[in-house]
Amino acid sequence: MSFVGHIRELAAARRELETRRLLVVGGAPDADRSAFLDAVAREVADEAGLPVYRFRVADAGDRSGEAGRTPGEAADAVVEACRGVFVVHPCVVVVDGVPAGAADAVPTGTADGSLLAGLISAFAESESFLLVGSTDAREGASALPSDGCADGWALLTRAAVHCDRGDPRAAGPLLRRAVEAHQVAGDRRGEAWAVFLYGRMCRLRGRAEDARRLLHIARERFRAVGERPGEAWACGELARLATRSGAPDPDALAEARRLHERAGDRRGAAWAHLWWTVARADEPGFPWREEFTNAQGRFHEVSDRLGTAWTLHHHALTLARTDGTDGVDGTGERRREADRLFEGALALFEEADCPHGRAWTMLEYALRSPAHRFLNGEWAAEIRHVFHGIGDEAGEAWVNLAEAGPSPDGEPPYELACRYPTALLDTLGWTEAGEPLIPRAARDTQPEPRPGFPRPGDRDRPDDSRAHVRLTLLDDVPVPDVPARIALQVVPGPGHPWSTAQLPPLTARATSLGHAEIDPAHGVPADGAEFRFTPHRPGSHRLRFTVEDPATGTVLQQIEAEIDVVPSDPGPHRPTAPAPRPSARRA
């Protein structure tokens, strides 16, 4: 619709916005158009309870001495700034002052060469409202991408949202669909971004080798298509892999920041600056206070609240662990300043809908501020609940450690030892008061248990003498209300007696731990046990399989499997909270 400059059009504009979550207005003087956009934004924001963000294309080149940008560079800045807002929380975004030159420019992240298309792509399938004010808005331009086929870019955006909020498991199904969509469309650039996000997801889940392989592939594909911002992001993620071993690589992070700056990617440069600062924050004599402030300023320029929140988190953590050589007089004053920073980070993580950052900030705040912890007798249960909501069992294990204190023998608990490298756990320290100094890198990943890692009491038992349960999903990625077949096999190791004899008639019992059905309830592995899994909602589902010896009534092994279920429609969804995981019993 086109703007005609009268307030009586407000109701019609609002109806259009509520239908499409996108409104393009034009054909009016700047003052009238801006007033109209502000009126629509206020009405929608007040009713929906959402924050409002305003951008002017004309201002995009005026920050930090960057005036004189070309229309294409200004368009890049606007789209990147909007992506920074969109990916962290639903909101109302007003982009005004779109001149003809910027409308025809080719911004980073667009597929068809227009600023308007770039904004539409950034907000596709989101829960945010987008209002665009342009002097040359075209009739019919305010249409979102068709839902008739998979939109690879929208799927990538949703996957990035899940990773940013600390729920990488939900990103997997979206990325698989995105790869297929870009391959069908022949979009090599989109496929490169999908591979990159796959690598990032693997890093978040602690799968270092998979992450390294995929990020190297993504970097080469970015180079092949000339995608300089993508190359910089891949280099930064590869540099962050080093933190998992407890030995960060600040030089590689500094190089990633330079690549972002050469590519004109200010948001990427801000993140690289933050991780470079975090990598060096514990070095003696490093000016961490100044560098955290610089990183915070960078994030403020691109309106990235999530980056600001993590900056405040690490700034507070560094301040709380200093010994008085940071220029702040007195332990009490340092603690008060750290508390203020932790509280600011908590508020931003809450606004950004990032439970991963919120849980870690709650934990560190509680550990560094005894008064705050003692005010809430359920502090550990509350933090554990937030970690549990995103399936972060590693985070729950750190809460357990903080609550239990150091072990008498100095060995890390099994739930941490089976997930993290020994080199990282060796950097775990303790204060005189018995509070853990958790390695910074612990919050960079949500690692799963390593397969075959010996449980307590099993260290002298050779692995090849065991029999293992193997589960295979026989159908495509499951969708709600459609049965998917799962095969269960018992595979004896070479040293197990069953490896040279017929498998006995064991019984495998299947149980769904969420909103799903599984049948039959029992199967016989020797005959080829097969189950039909029917989920009733998208997200992550857990199934429990119990293998028993019916002759003796003995439970031989109990395992749990996690299956990602994608929505049958392309609309966004949130994963269901996982059911509690009981301890497994082994034969």
Image: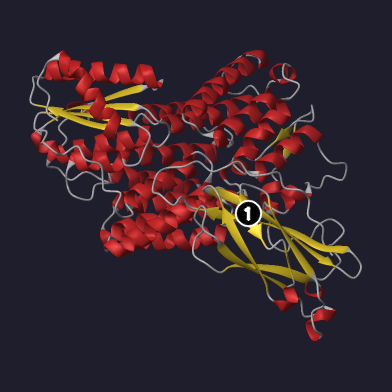
| Kind of element beneath mark 1 | strand
Q: Quadrant of residue 258?
A: top left
Q: Residue at x 15, y 32 (%)?
A: 68
129 vs 383, nearest the viewer: 129
Q: Looking at the image, is 198 positioned above or below residue 87?
A: below
Marks counted in the figure total: 1
Q: Quadrant of residue 320?
A: top right
262 vs 13, nearest the viewer: 13
Q: Is residue 493 visible?
A: yes
Q: Amino acid at mark 1?
A: Glu
Rendering colour mode: secondary structure
| Most distant residue in the bottom direction | 500
Q: Which residue is mark 1?
A: 517
Q: Residue at x 47, y 40 (%)?
A: 164
* Residue 404, position as x, y percentages in the image: 81, 35
374 vs 241, nearest the viewer: 374
* Residue 375, position as x, y percentages in the image: 72, 16
User: Going by the image, does 147 lie left or right of 562?
Assistant: left
Q: Quadrant of residue 66?
A: top left
